[in-house]
Image (cartoon, helix red, strand yellow):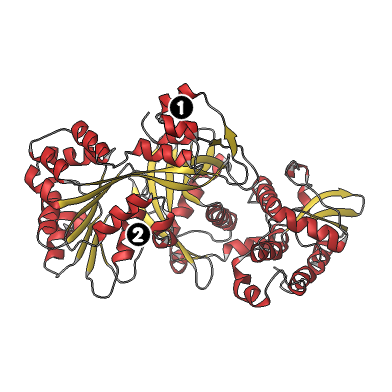
Amino acid sequence: MNINSPLLRKFITLGRVDAETVKLKQREFSSTAELIAKCSGINGHELAEQCIDLFRVPYFDLRDFNVELIPKELVKEKLIRQHHILPLVKKGRKLYIAASDPTDYGAFENFEFSTGLSCEVVVADYQQLDNKIEQLLDASGSLNLSDDEFKEFADLDTDSSKDQQNTGEDEKDDAPIIVYINKILMDAIKKGASDLHFEPYEHKYRVRFRIDGILHEMASPPNSLATRLSARIKVMARLDIAEKRKPQDGRIKLKITERKSIDFRVSTLPTLWGEKIVMRILDSSSAMLGIDVLGYEPEQKKLYMDALEQPQGMILVTGPTGSGKTVSLYTGLNILNQPERNISTAEDPVEINLEGINQVQINPKADMTFANALKAFLRQDPDVVMVGEIRDLETAEISIKAAQTGHLVMSTLHTNSAPETLTRLLNMGVPAYNVASSITLIIAQRLARRLCPKCKTPETLPAEELKRQGFNEQQISELTLFAPKGCDSCTEGYKGRVGIYEVMQITPEIAQIIMRGGNSLEIAEVSLRSGFNNLRLSGLKKAADGVTSLAEINRVTSF
C-alpha cells in the first residue's frame, strides 16, 4: 500500500478521508483504494469513477476479463501482490496494466523495470481487481515462482521449524514443496476456508477448500507429489512421517507476522492410494464474535442470556459436526468469563485457547476421560463447567449432578433437534426426574450460507409452493424472497454464514412430559405451542428477512 499516494492525499484534501483515521487503519487494508473506500464510505466502482474524473485515466471493467489470456512471463506474483496491479495484455513493447490507484507511480516503475516494458495504466474497481488477481495466481500455478517469491512463502514460520534438520528432509530438494504447502495455507486463510482436504487418487491428486460449508476444488498438483506433500504436512504437524498405516492427529501453528499466528488441526487417514489429510483452521477470532452477530433472533438471544445468568443448571447445544456448536459455547463462555468466576472446560480437542479459562485436553490413553475430568473439576471449586460432549451415561450423570449442586454446566450432544436431545438422555439411562430438574435450555443449530448483499436477486414463487414450504398466509402476503446470482465479491452468490437456531426452554409443561416418559414428538408440539420456533421455522424467517435463500434453508433443515 502506498500511504503517500497522490490519490490518498487528494481525498484527504477534499475532506472525504480523515488523516488520523488513515494512520489508525492503514494496516487493516491491502490496498490504498480499499483504505479510501472504507474510510470514505463509497464502493470500489464509485472510487474508480472519481479516479477517472480526477486523473483522466481510462476505466477497465474486469468482470468478464479472462486471466488465462495473460502471458505467463508477465505473472510476477510478488510484484502483483505488493502493488495490487494486474497485467492485462502486451502489445509490442507496451504493457497494459490495471490498478485501483492510478497514481502509484513507484509501483508502475517497478513493473516496468521487472518486465522491460513500458506500462500503460487503466483504473479498475479494487474489488474486481482483488478477485482477478487471486484467479490469476491460482491459475498460474504455485510451483512456478521466482526466487524472491520462494523466499517469501518459504520464510513462513511454524512450530516445527526448529526440528526440521532432524527429519531427514533434503531442504534444497523440498523447497518447492515447502513453498507450495505454505501458499495453499495462505490461500485458504485469505479465502475464509474452514477446512482443507488433501486427497490422493489413482490418477489424480486434488486439494479442496471448504468455504461457507461447501467444498470447492482449488488445485490439482501432479499425482507424483502425493507422498512428498503428505510428508511435508506431517513434518509441520510433528507427526511420524514413517507411519503410513494408522490415522494420526496433530497441530500446526503458522506464524503469519510477529504478532499474528493461525492454528491448524491436522488429521491423516490411510486410503487406498495414499494418505488423505484434512486440516481444520482454528480461528480464535470466531470465539470473540459476540452473540449479536451469530444470528439469534431477539427472543432466542434473551433465552440464552437468561440461562447464562442462572447460578446453576445445564445448557445443551446440539447439532451435527460443523454446525457451529463450539462457537456458540465459546461465545457463552466469553460472556461468563469474569474475574469472580472459576471456569473449567474439558474438550477433545481444545480448539481455541481462551484467556482466563482453565482448559483441559481429554486424553483417554492417560485415563483423562470426560467423566474423570469432571470429577476433578468438582474438587476445584468451579462456578462454570463446560464438557465438550456428553458421550456416555457416566459423563451425563456427573454433569447432571454438577448442575443440581450449584454449578452452571454447558455441553453438547449430537442430535437433530432440541426435543430429541431429551429423549437421547433418557435412552442413555439418565432418570427422567434428573433430566427434568437439571436442564435449563437446549439449543439446536445449523449453519446456512448468507446471500451476497451485492448480487442477490428477488425470487418469485407461487403462493401454493410457499404454503407447502411452510410459510403462513400472513407471511406470504408480504413476502420477498431472494436467490443467489454470483459476482466477483462472493462464492456462487453466497458470502459468509449465519446460524439457524431452535432455542427451547424447559418449561413446567415440558418437564411434565419428560417425567411421564413422553416422546420427542409430544415435546416438539408443546415447544411450538409455547412459542419456541423449531429449526425449520427459524430458517424460513431468515429467508423471509432476505438473509439467505429458500434453497439454502431446504439444504440445511428438514423439509
Q: Quadrant of residue 418?
A: top left
Mark 1 surroundings within 10 Å by alpha-carbon count, few (fewer than 14), some (14 through 19), many (20 or more) = some
Indicate whether 27 appears above or below 74: below
Q: Amino acid at mark 2?
A: Thr
Q: Which residue in the protein does label 2 denote? A: 331
**Looking at the rendering, in which quadrant would you find the C terminus?**
top left
**Secondary element type, mark 1:** helix
- Relative vertical location of residue 67 with respect to residue 342 in this rendering, above or below: above
Q: Which type of secondary structure does the marked residue at label 2 adopt? A: helix
Residue marked by disc 1:
466
- Residue at 31 percent across and 59 percent down: it is 332
Find residue 64 and report its horizontal and vertical position in percent.
Answer: 74, 41
Residue at the limit of the structure toward the top, as seen here: 464
Q: Is residue 10 visible?
A: yes
Q: CA distance from mark 2 to mark 1?
A: 35 Å
Question: In the rendered structure, which amino acid carries the disc numbered 1?
Answer: Leu
Give the left or right position of residue 513, taking residue 321 as reference. left
Counting every numbered tag in the picture gives: 2
